[in-house]
Amino acid sequence: MTKKSRVKKSDLSQQKCAPCAKGTPRLSGKALNEITRRLTGKWQVKGKKQLEKAFKFPDFLKALQFTNQVGKIAEKEGHHPDVYLSYGEVRLQLSTHSVGGLSENDFILAAKVNQIK
């Protein structure tokens, strides 16, 4: 990604995560607010540096199956969340280490996770 973000594109889930070029700034201010509004599914921005969401399931097996689906998407996109798995719950935390906060990739991956049935 260049300094100019791709946030203008309409559907985040249809985009592909791309490596951040050296010097890419993390999302902040108006750009962060704009892309946050475009993300559905009740994700929360924590400290302006991380996206987080907890997913509830009726049992451990369903939570594990969801975790495996997230893993497949993350591998395909080359962008990996922190995953916390427990009985009946999976918590995902997204941030881009190379920019020290949130990048467009975090929102793209979150949108793709939202599509898991």
Image: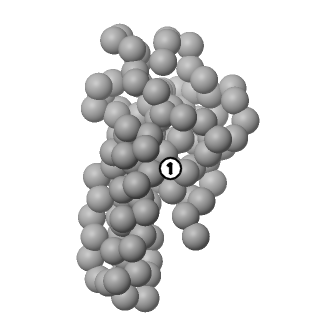
Relative image position of residue 50 (x, y in whole percent): 37, 43
Residue 34 appears in the picture as rendered = yes
Tell how many labels.
Answer: 1
Q: Is residue 53 above or below residue 76?
A: below
Foreground residue, 52 or 2? Answer: 2
User: Which residue: 46% across, 27% down?
Assistant: 18
Foreground residue, 31 or 116? Answer: 116
Q: Is residue 4 above or below residue 115?
A: above
Relative image position of residue 97 (x, y in whole percent): 28, 32
Relative image position of residue 116 (x, y in whole percent): 55, 64
User: Which residue: 37% across, 88% down?
Assistant: 59
The quarter of the picture where the C terminus appears is bottom right
User: Which residue: 33% across, 12% down?
Assistant: 22
User: Which residue: 36% across, 56% down?
Assistant: 71
* Position of residue 105 in the picture relative to residue 115 (left or right): left
Q: Is residue 13 above or below residue 8?
A: below
At mark 1, the secondary structure is: helix
According to the image, label 1 marks what residue?
110
Foreground residue, 100 or 109? Answer: 109
Which kind of residue does numbered mark 1 sit on?
Ala
Q: Quadrant of residue 56?
A: bottom left
Colour mapping: one colour
Q: Quadrant of residue 48?
A: top left
Residue 45 appears in the picture as rendered = no
Relative image position of residue 72 (x, y in whole percent): 40, 55
In the current view of this chain or complex, which residue is farthest to the right? 10
* Position of residue 47 in the picture relative to residue 115 (left or right): left
Q: Residues within 10 Å of mark 1 (few under 14, many from 20)?
A: many
